Amino acid sequence: MLNQLLLQYAYLQVLDLLTTLAFMLHGVREGNPLVRLMMHATSNPLNGLLAVKLIATGLGLYCWRLGRGKLLARINVIFAVVVAWNLAALILAAF
């Protein structure tokens, strides 16, 4: 069960990364102020984004190692909503 949660978490992180990259390509501004700050703090926005995703992956691994399945499941729900929101924003931006 815990391994499944970690796999879902990693998958959602990749989807969030891809939708954020799509935002960047279509001129949509990043909504998360911390991610936006990291993107501006580095020489290349992609480096900032990758740094945030690396930190997020580390936090997911930390929860997994501590056996915090409920927390990881809740985070997965939040990221599933974020990815759905990102996709909806991309679709609306295309109109």
Image (cartoon, rainbow, N blue to C red):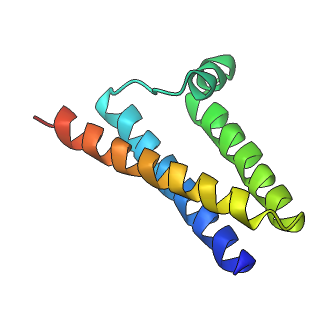
Residue 51 locus on image (x, y percent):
71, 39
Seen as rendered, the residue at the extreme front is 70
Residue 37: percent from the left, percent from the top?
A: 63, 19
The number of callouts visible is 0
Closest to the observer, 62 or 21: 62
In the visual, does 73 lie left or right of 58? left
Report the residue at 40% width, 24% height from top.
29
Towards the viewer: 82 or 57: 82
What residue is drawn where x is 28% and y is 37%?
89
The extreme bottom residue here reads: 1
x and y percentages locating residue 35 in the rendered image = 60, 29
Up/down of 15 relative to 67, above or below = above
Query: Image check: 33 left or right of 60?
Result: left
Q: Is residue 73 above or below residue 91?
A: below
Q: What residue is rendered at 40% in x and 33% in y? A: 24
Give the x, y percent position of residue 95: 10, 34
Front in this rendered view, residue 44 or 56? 56
**Residue at 36% in and 42% down:** 86
Quadrant in which the N terminus is drawn: bottom right
Give the quadrant of residue 28: top left
Residue farthest to the right, as pictured: 66
**Between 21 and 87, the one nearer to me in the picture:** 87
Compared across the picture, whether 72 is left or right of 31 comes to right
